[in-house]
Amino acid sequence: MPRFTTAPVEEVAPKRRQRQPSQRAQTQQQYQEALRSALLDKSEALVVELDPGDKPLTIRNRIKRAADLLGLEHIVIRRKKDRIVAYQAQSKGTE
């Protein structure tokens, strides 16, 4: 015959795990932090050095999406060989 006992719920219930953000969300966060640091905090250009396996169009799209999410306007993205540079265009004389 089975024996019955009692125990505090905290001891017997499975612990809730905190979910990690998805790989896509983590990548998106990295690009946002890099853009925020370069363009907003330092007022400099973001330079991305491409690895041989990187797809330039993918990197460009990630930079553009991060800029959109940060509310940055007039972002210029240029590629030269294995580097992609992103910066905010200088506004011409506003009145």
Image (cartoon, grey):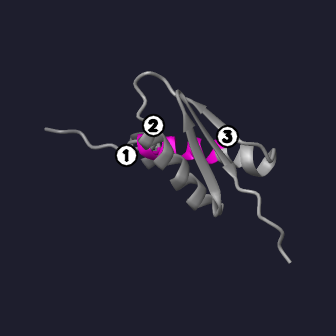
Looking at this rendering, what residue extends furthest in the right direction?
95
Nearer-the-camera pick, 80 or 54: 80
The three-letter code of the residue at mark 3 reads: Leu
Residue wearing tag 2: 56
**In magenta segment, residue 93:** no
**In magenta segment, residue 22:** yes
Nearest to viewer (mark 3 / mark 1): 3
The rendered magenta stretch, by its main secondary structure, is classed as helix
The three-letter code of the residue at mark 2 reads: Pro
Nearer-the-camera pick, 81 or 16: 81
Nearer-the-camera pick, 45 or 69: 45
Task: Work out whether residue 8 can be spotted.
Answer: no
Q: Quadrant of the C terminus?
A: bottom right
- Residue at (41%, 34%) from the top-left corner? 55
Q: Quadrant of the N terminus?
A: top left
The three-letter code of the residue at mark 1 reads: Thr
- Disc 2 packing (10 Å; few <14; some 14–19; many ≥20): some
- Residue 46 is marked as 3
- Residue 6 is marked as 1
Which mark is first along the chain, 1 or 3?
1
- Residue at (62%, 52%) from the top-left corner? 76
Q: Secondary structure at mark 2?
A: helix
Q: Secondary structure at mark 3?
A: strand
x, y percent for residue 66? 56, 52
Which quadrant of the structure image shows residue 94? bottom right
- Residues drawn in magenta: 21-34
Q: Taking 55 as reference, is 72 above or below it?
A: below
x, y percent for residue 42? 81, 44
x, y percent for residue 47? 65, 35
What is the CA distance from the residue labelled 1 to the residue labelled 2?
61 Å
Which mark is first along the chain, 2 or 1?
1
